[in-house]
Amino acid sequence: MWRAVLARDRDADGRFVYAVRSTGIYCRPSCPSRKPHRDRVEFFETPADAERAGYRACRRCRPLEAMQADPWLERIRRACVYLSNVDGHPTLATLAARIGGSPYHLQRNFKRIVGLTPREYADACRLRTVKRRLRAGRDVTGAMLEAGYGSSSRFYERAAPLLGMPPKTYQRGGAGMDVRYTIVTSPLGRLLVAATPRGVCAVAMGESDQRLERALHAEYPAAAIQPDLGSLAGWTRRILAHLAGRVPRLDLPLDVQATAFQWQVWTALAAIPRGETRSYADVASAIGRPRAARAVARACATNPVALAIPCHRVVPAAGGVGGYRWGPARKRALLARERLRG
């Protein structure tokens, strides 16, 4: 949501509002007013929630109008609440009967508003529950069942690969892992590079060192994570040179966990020439899975090493830049830089 605010993303209008503590005002994401500091902002699903917290509507962007213009917003909000709490995978027909509308229009509007299909959203909720249970000390089987996975095969097929490591290791918060990181200034904001003795495990972009560090520690709370004393300097310089257009191809030793399918997708992304883009369907066809465009999108979204695996070069066939783990504004900037320098 914060990335949408920074990008003044009109597509996010109506999905939520953000409020500024120092002014007592809430706005829609695309509000043209000056952006506040992140630590002064909180988010609400609806204007009513913001007003109950004591905020008043912005007279410049009129956030109430954005919410009232789309009759599907409240239905999709209720669908999200339901999917966050229900066990298993309710069918589209079941979900549509619960919130109103046809299964076809539900699927179409859910994807438009949330950016995911109902199944993908439910999977994300279950994965979040698994992570929370594992970090709280639950055994793998208990965490799996409490998150709504009916069988271990379904869990290991759909959720375990997204943990980035074996569930037992994730349960221990990355215990036994030795991670070193450095943060430098880049043309796209602060850039974190982290590595194990085997290779680079994370390349991330953000607004501040503190947020990047918190994200790394939150993902691996029990790992031995320390600031780097110089061993990452060569890889970091190479990444910055790649951003500047001096290194056309970024080949780094990587230490990331992935499924065979994810590696297929990521290998195809690495083959996209600098300055060019492909659609999700193009990538699916390139790996011999022409009907797997949505799965390709998920593989792009779970890429932990920005730039080294160039998921920013995959865009929607319908136009626009689409989603990006580090924000659509950075994706636009990356593509513009690559087109300029070739």
Image (cartoon, rainbow, N blue to C red):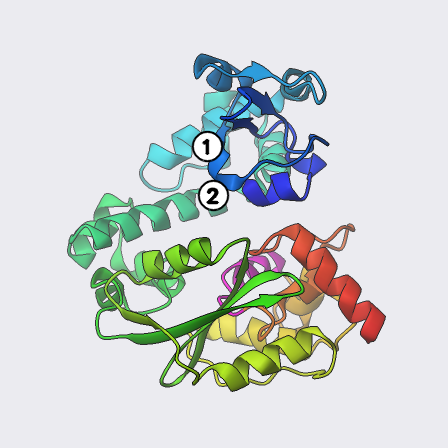
Height in image: 23 above or below 269?
above
Measuring from the top left, give residue 211's x and y in whole percent.
44, 53
Determine if residue 60 is in view. Answer: yes
Q: Which mark is residue 121?
A: 2
Name the residue located 68 percent from the left edge and 58 percent from the top edge. 331
Magenta span: chief secondary structure: helix
Check if mark 2's residue and mark 1's residue have beta carbons within 8 Å.
yes
> x, y (%) of residue 61?
70, 22
The mark total stands at 2
In this view of the protein, which residue sits in the foreground, 21 or 202? 21
Pointer 2: residues within 10 angstroms few (<14), some, or many (20+)? some
Disc 2 and disc 1: Cα gap in Å?
Answer: 8 Å
Q: Amino acid at mark 2?
A: Tyr
Give percent across and percent down for residue 176: 22, 75
| Lower position in the chain sequence, tag 2 or tag 1 | 1
Q: Classify mark 2: helix, strand or loop.
A: helix
Which residue is at the front of the view, 201 or 243? 243
The residue lying furthest to the right in this view is 340
Residue under the point 64% across and 35% down? 12
State which quarter of the image contains the C terminus. Answer: bottom right
- Identified at 38% across, 85% down, the residue is 198
Q: Quadrant of the N terminus?
A: top right
Q: Residues within 10 Å of mark 1 (few under 14, many from 20)?
A: some
Q: Is residue 297 magenta?
A: yes
Task: Give x and y (percent) for residue 2.
Answer: 55, 41
**Residue range of the region highlighted in magenta in the rendering:** 292-305
> Type of residue at label 1?
Cys
**Front residue of 215 and 271:** 215
Tag shown at residue 80: 1
Q: Quadrant of residue 290?
A: bottom right
Q: Is residue 165 left or right of residue 95?
A: left
| Residue 238, numbered circle | none
